[in-house]
Image (tube, rainbow, N blue to C red):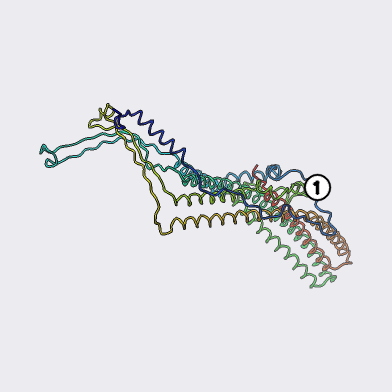
Amino acid sequence: MKPSLSNSSPASRTRTLAAALLLAGAVSGCSMAPAYQRPAAPVADAFPAVQPSAGASGSAATAGATQTAAETGWRTFFPDGRLQQLITTALENNRDLRIAALRIEEARGAYRIQRADRLPTLNATLSESRSRAPGFANSSGQAQINERFDAGLGISAFELDFFGRVKSLSDSALASYLATEEARRAAQISLVSEVAKAYYTERAFAEQQTLAESTYDARKRTFELTKQRVEGGASSRLDLRSNEQQMETARAAALSLARQRAQASNALALLLGQTLPAGIATGGPAPTEDAQADAMSALTAGLPSDLLANRPDIRAAEQRLKAANANIGAARAAFFPRITLTSAIGSASRDFSGLFESGSSTWSFAPQLVLPIFDTGRNLANLDVSHARKNIAVADYEKTIQQAFREVADALAARSYLGEQVAAQRAVQDAQAERLRLLQLRFENGVASSLDVLDAQRELFTAEQALVQARLLRTTSAIDLYRALGGGLK
C-alpha cells in the first residue's frame, strides 16, 4: 500500500518543505524593471577655454598642473595648521554632517528590512489551550475540560516573487541607501570648503579692520597737524573740518569691519558646531600669500566626464534615478498575480510530555494566489506615478551635471584672471602709497594742502581694501574649484 503524506516522517516532511521553498526561490525573482541606461551628460565634451584679457599673461598656476582635486587630500590643499584644526573640528561636530550620517543609518535599516522580504521568515511556536465544553455538547452529558499543547516551526505569508516585485523594491531600497551615502560625502566636501572660505573671510575682515585702524591713526595725525596750522593761520577751518570728517570716516569703517569680522566668526562657529577654540582665528595670515594661492590653484580640471566619478552629488543623483527605475518594476509586477505561502510543521498533544511522541506530528501547507481583477485604475495610476518619478529623477540627474559643469567652468574662468587682477591691484596700492608719501612730505613742508593729503589717504585706503578683497576672491575661487572638482573627501 502506498504511504500517505500524513503518515510520512517529520524528517521527510521537512525535506519536502525545504525543497519546495528552494524551488520557489529558483523560479522567482525575474525583474520587470526596465534595463537601466545612464542618460547622456547634457554638457560639452570639454570645459570652455578662457582667453586672458589684453595685458594679462594668464595664471602661472595652471602651467604644470598635474594633480586632480579628488587625489588631493584637504590637509595637503590647506597647509594652514589653524584651518586644519577647524576642519577637523567641523567634521566631528557639524550638525548637517551628523544629520547626513544618521540618514545613512536610516536608509541602511530600510534596505535591510526590504531585503529581508526576499527570504522566508521562520518562526517557532509553543502554545497551550484549554476549553470547557458543557454537558449538552458531548455524549456523556457531563461538562468536559479539554487541554492541548502545540509546538512547531512555521513560515507565514512568504511571497513567491515570480514577477520580481519584491526584488524591485529591494533594489530601489539599495539604491536609495547608496544615494544617502553619496549625499553624506557631498555634504563633507561642501563642509570642508565652507569652513575654509569662512576662515579666510574672517581673516580678510581682520586685515581690513587693521588697515582701517591704521588709516584712522594716520588721519588723526594729519588732523592734529592741520589743527596746529589752523592755530598758526596756515590753514583754514574748512581744512580742519575736512580732516575731521575723513578721520571719523576711517573710524566708522574700522567699527563696521569689526562688526563684520564678529559676524564672520559666528558663521564659522556655526559650521564648527561649537564655539571657536580660543585663539584659533586671532592670528596667522589673512588671505593666502601669492605662492600659496598659486599652489591652491594648481589643479588639473580634466574632462567633464571625470565629474561623473569625482562628484558625490552626481553619483547620488544617479542612485536616485536607479531607485526610481527599480520602482517601475514593482509597479509593473502589481498587474500580475501574487502568490504567498504559509506552512508549518510541528506536533500536538493533550499532555506536554507527549508533544514529541510518535503520532503527535502535525503539518499545514496553505499557498494563496491573489489575482488583481478590478482596482478602479489604482495599479495603472501607480505605474504612471513611477514613470513620472523616473522622468523627474532623470531631469534632476541632468541638472546636477549641468550645475557641476557650470561651477567648474566659473572657477576656471576666475583662475584665469584673478592672479593678474591681484597683481594689478597690488600695483595700484604701491602707486597710491608712494603718492601719499610724497604728498605727506610736501604737506609737512608747507607746500601741499591737507586736502591733497586727505585725497591720497582716501585713495590708498580704497586700494588697500580692494587688494584684500582681490586676494580673498582668488583664495575662495581656488577653494571653489577644489570643491567643484570633487576635492575634500581624503
Residue at the spot 48% in from the left edge and 49% down from the top edge: 330
Quarter containing the C terminus:
top right
* Relative to 381, 287 lies left or right: right
**What is the count of numbered marks?**
1
Locate residue 429: give its quadrant: bottom right
Residue position marked by numbered label 1 in the rendering: 63
Q: Position of residue 266 (x, y in %)?
A: 61, 54
Local packing at callout 1 (Cα closer than 10 Å; few below 14, some 14-19, many 20+) is: few
Residue drawn at x 45%, y 55% as measured from the top left: 379
Q: Is residue 101 above or below residue 149?
A: below
* Furthest residue in direction left, as rendered: 141
- The residue closer to the viewer here, 2 or 179, is 2
**Residue 391 in picture, x, y percent from top left:** 56, 56
Image quadrant assignment for residue 80: top right
Rendering coords of residue 183 (x, y %): 58, 48
Above or below: residue 293 compared with residue 241 = above
* Residue at (48, 51) in percent of width and height: 332
Tell which of 390 and 339 is nearer to you. Answer: 339
Query: Dot 1: what SS?
Result: loop
The N terminus - image quarter: top left
Image location (x, y in percent) of residue 189: 63, 48
Viewer-proximal residue among 416 and 138: 138
The amino acid on which the numbered mark 1 sits, given as a three-letter code, is Ala
